[in-house]
Structures are given as C-alpha cells and as structure tokens.
Amino acid sequence: MKNEKWGQVYEPVPPELDLRLAYTLAQLEEENPKARGLTLRTAVIVMALLLALGGVAYAVISSKVADIYGWFFGAEKKESLLIGDIAMLGQSFTLGDVTYTLDEVIYEGGTLYGTGTMRPREGSNVVLMASDHSIWEPAGYVLHYGDEENVPEDAPTYLELAQERDAKIIRPICNAQGYVKEDGELSSSEVGNFILPSPDGTIRFTFEFEGYGGKIQRSDTYVLRFKVANWEIDQEGYDLRDEDENTYVGAEWDVTVAPSLKGE
C-alpha cells in the first residue's frame, strides 16, 4: 500500500488520540525503564491498537489516581476518573531529607484528584515513616485502610530498618490545601488526604478537594497548594519537635497543573 493511501484506511483520528498515545507510552516508560528505547514500530503498533479499539481505547490509559480511587471506591469511580481531564506531571520539591513529587492530577465533576510520592532525598540516609504508623510497625506496608496487605513475618519494623542502616527515621507529610484562584485567594472544601507506604521506601500521598462553596470550575490550568513538612522521630518513637531538639522543617509548595488529556 502506498504511503499516501495509508491515512484513508481509518476514519479521521480524534485530536485527543495522539495525546492519549503519548500518555500511555510515558506511563510504560515510567513503569519499565527499558521501555525508554521504544522504537517507531512499537509506537505504530500501539496507535493501531488504539484505532482498532475505537471508543474503548480510552480505557488503555494507565492512571495512578484512577487505580487508587478505584481500589477504595470501586470500578465505577475508576471509570469516571479515566474520562476526566488528566495531567501527568512529575514536578518535584525537596525539603530537608525528603523529595516530594506530584505525579498526576485529574479534574472530574468539579473535583480535583491527585497523587504523588515522597522519597528520601538523593544521597540521604533516612527511613521514611508514614504519619499514621509507629516505629514498631512493619516498614512499608499499608496497615490502616481495612484491606491490609499480607505482611511477611520477617518484615522489619521502621525501628529495625533504621538501626540496620544506621539511618534517621523521618516522618514526612504532603497535604493538599486547595487551589489558588486568580486573585490569589486559596479555595478548598471537603479536602481528603491519605497516604500509602510502599516496601521500596517511598510513601504515596493522594488527595481530593472541591472549591470553597461548591464545585471547581473547569479550567485549562489550576494552581494547587500543598503544605509539605518533615521531622525526625527518635528511637523511642517521640517526635523531635520541641525546643530542645526541633528537627521540623516546613514550607508551602505551589504547583501549576495543566491537563493535556481532556475528557468529555
């Protein structure tokens, strides 16, 4: 088949499809570093699959936000988020021994949903502990959401892991505060924040919120504000935040979010 006739095989490609393809390939690269060498042939195959699937192609999108909220609230919630306005990000902010990264945000139905990761700053020797965990609990496992993972019997506690590595125990937080309006006013309502520790030493933060007094108006960009902080925990389990030994550091972090994948 001649090249000039190739485009006549399918109906006109929706303008959003190239963005959906780029998003899917980016997710594949993130999940598998070896995929960074994807060839043009691979991209063509993915595009052909998306075209063949038609309307079902939108389900190909890999979304951390949709996966998490689907885990909490079911398949219907996941499906609704997959057709929202999706922004894949990767913007980071480092404070003390912790690097905070906002991975993805979705606007859907007047609400902003998002997720990101907290990880040790490169070169630091710390063990991150989720704010709802204690030093005597298994390190890196979800324990308090009613659907507990199977924790290996030999899983070290946060204290044991820190002692083994001769590392500090750090409790980090990254709480969504809301979005910043054009006049600079912070707006938020019904804010929800929760965290999910992982055996790889990172902690995933997830959030959702509406605007003050009602739903957030759909927009091309949103400026989100977070409160980020962290401090050290001693080997007795006490927060080192008093006058004698205050290790607390905190800041506000504003991130501009521009969804590139537009839903219905």
Image (cartoon, helix red, strand yellow):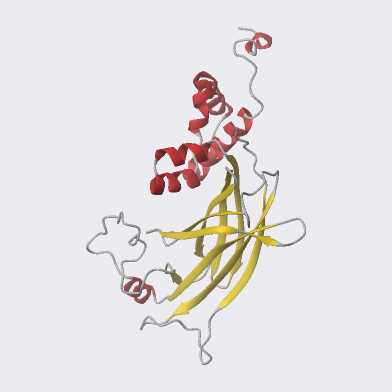
Write the residue at 51% across / 67% down: 173
Q: Is residue 112 above or below residue 191?
A: above
In the figure, 189 relative to 245: above or below?
above
Q: Position of residue 25 (x, y in %)?
A: 55, 36
Foreground residue, 121 or 158?
A: 158
Image-quadrant location for residue 255: bottom right
Picture quadrant where residue 233 is located: bottom left
Asked if one can make out residue 47 in the rendered structure from this viewpoint, the answer is yes
Q: In the orientation shown, which residue stands out farthest toward the front?
A: 213
- The picture places residue 145, in percent across and down from the top left corner, at 35, 58
Q: Quadrant of the C terminus?
A: top right
From the image, which quarter does the N terminus lie in?
top right
Horizontal side of 217 relative to 53 (left or right) equals right
- Front-most of residues 163 and 76: 76
Q: Position of residue 186 (x, y in %)?
A: 68, 62
> How many discs appear?
0
Q: Image quarter for residue 202? A: bottom left
Q: Is residue 124 above or below residue 15?
A: below
Frontmost residue, 7 versus 133:
133
The one nearer the camera, 191 or 79, is 191
Task: Name the residue rendered at 48%, 32% in the picture.
Answer: 59
Q: With 130 as the anchor, is 26 left or right in this view?
A: right
